[in-house]
Image (cartoon, rainbow, N blue to C red):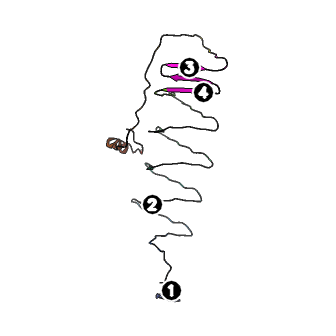
Amino acid sequence: MKAQPGSREADSAKPVEKFGVPLVLMDSPASINWATPASTVLFAGKQLQWTTQGDMHLAAAHTVSSVAGNAAGFFSHAGGIQAFAGNGPVSLQAHTGELEILADKEITIISVNDSIEIKASKKIVLQAGQSSITLDGGDITFACPGNFTVKGGQHIFEGGGSGAAGLPALPTGSAICIECLKNAAAKASSFLVR
């Protein structure tokens, strides 16, 4: 109830407006700070939304882990998206589907100090315009409607040779790998390699 005018006594004729359901509301015309030397936990049985009209920064002294049970998306209207690893590898994996890289303009792949390997268990097709190179099993096919030019100090054609492509194994099924969880925890990694 509201207080009586000029007094701290409650006035039963002036009840305070309340929400129809139990809520916790924090509102401030200036800043709101949450700080603790221990841990802070946010949990929502349904949705949890973060919205800011300015910038939003997320920083951690050790590991930042993001997991989605269904789908995850990153969209940038202007300015692009960047991923940097100052000291360590960067891995993109599609365990049961396709991995697509699509650009309206150029795509550049550079290895500054080492090599570039492109491997497939079945077939690789390199195509530009109407010309293509197809690596299919034990066959290599060159196709072009114009001239096929080969430049080299020597042209040496030796006997046939073969070698299996070394491909990493991807996880199968939905079973939880306990050993994978232990290895990821030991390395402070949010990705599981099975």
Residue on which the image places disc 1: 14
Q: Nearer the viewer, mark 3 or mark 2?
A: 3
- x, y percentage for residue 159? 48, 10
Residue on which the image places disc 2: 46
Alpha carbons under labels 4 and 2: distance apart: 48 Å
- Viewer-side residue, 149 vs 96: 96
* Relative vertical location of residue 148 with respect to residue 73 in this rendering, above or below: above
Q: Count residues near mark 4 (Cα–Cα under 10 Å), then give few for <14, some for 14-19, many for 20+.
A: few
Amino acid at circle 2: Lys
Residue 170 among magenta residues: no
Q: Count residues near mark 3 (Cα–Cα under 10 Å), then give few for <14, some for 14-19, many for 20+.
A: few
Question: Is 140 placed left or right of 183 in the picture?
Answer: right
Q: Earlier in the sequence, mark 1 or mark 4?
A: 1
Please identify the quadrant where the C terminus is shown.
Answer: top left
Q: Nearer the viewer, mark 1 or mark 4?
A: 4
Amino acid at circle 4: Gln
- Overall secondary structure of the magenta section: strand
- x, y percentage for residue 173? 37, 40
Bounds of the magenta segment: 123-149
- Viewer-side residue, 157 vs 141: 141
Residue on which the image places disc 4: 127
Residue on which the image places disc 3: 141
Q: Earlier in the sequence, mark 2 or mark 1?
A: 1
- x, y percentage for residue 96? 44, 39
Alpha carbons under labels 3 and 2: distance apart: 55 Å
* Relative vertical location of residue 131 with respect to residue 154 in this rendering, above or below: below
Amino acid at circle 1: Lys
Q: Count residues near mark 2 (Cα–Cα under 10 Å), then give few for <14, some for 14-19, many for 20+.
A: few
Amino acid at circle 3: Thr
Secondary structure under the numbered disc 1 in the rendered image: loop
